[in-house]
Image: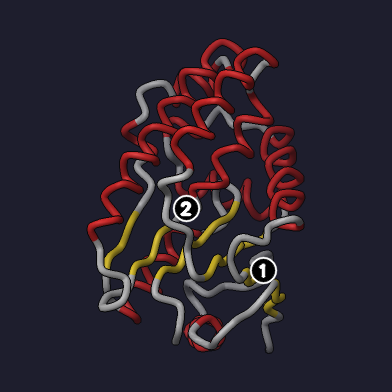
Amino acid sequence: MKARYIAVEGVIGAGKTTLAKLLHRRFGGQLVLEQHEENPFLPDFYRDPKRFAFQTQIFFLLSRWQQQQELHQIDLFNSRMTSDYLFAKDQIFAMLTLQERELELYEKLLIAVEKSVVKPDLVIYLQSSVERLMYNIQLRARSYEKEMSVEYISSLVDAYNQFFFHYKDSPLVVVNGTKLDFVNDLVQQEKLIDYIQQDHTGTEIYHAVE
């Protein structure tokens, strides 16, 4: 497999962290996980998005950037790395939640930091339906996610689909996870991982085979 750095993406509840851990277990190397719990503004954001959107977004941006700087120390020619987020997706949330002046300031900061971010060799985008995402969110029962609405998740689904429809920075594999149970169905899990470890170019759609 040529890809040394794989990033897994998807809307909240899509299973990106689970898949990232499975890939890490299979391929080894470094595992980089997004630290949602470290953002002190996140619970406030879900209760009052307009008031706390900017603080939440800036904290995430700088936290992700700092984490990305540590990746420069990893020799990707001799090691592998799997992450459960793509740095470039940060702007999806900014576009959805920030007011005009806040967004202008955010974009200036983004331009300043994104130049030093390492781009992945392969991105896996886990698509899913709003219904499946809401079910997964309720199932894992994280306290700070209990305020999430169907409308908010629906807006994220639309924004993610739009973002990845235009994404060209790395080879991209789009996986529809609505009916794909790669966690409990070991056959589906093996087929998905086998497909991921192939060489990829451009944008590809993974269709689960019964």
Mark 2 and mark 1 lie on one chain; the one further toward the N terminus is 2
Residue at 55%, 47% in the rendered image? 88
Q: Position of residue 194 (x, y in %)?
A: 51, 88
Location of the N terminus by quadrant is bottom left
- Disc 2 marks which residue? 85
Q: Quadrant of the C terminus?
A: bottom right
Q: Nearer the viewer, residue 110 or 21?
A: 110
**82 relative to 149, above or below:** below
Q: How far across and down, in percent of the image, does residue 13 sit?
A: 55, 51
Q: Position of residue 138 (x, y in %)?
A: 54, 44
Q: Is residue 68 shown left or right of residue 210?
A: left
Marks 2 and 1 close (CB-CB < 8 Å): no
Display colour scheme: secondary structure
Q: Secondary structure at mark 2?
A: loop
> Circle 1 sits in a helix, a strand or a loop, which is it?
strand
Crowdedness near tag 1: few (<14), some (14–19) or many (≥20) residues, C-alpha within 10 Å: many
Q: In terms of depth relative to the viewer, which is nearer, 94 or 76?
A: 76
Res. 105 image quadrant: top right
Mark 1 is on which residue type? Val
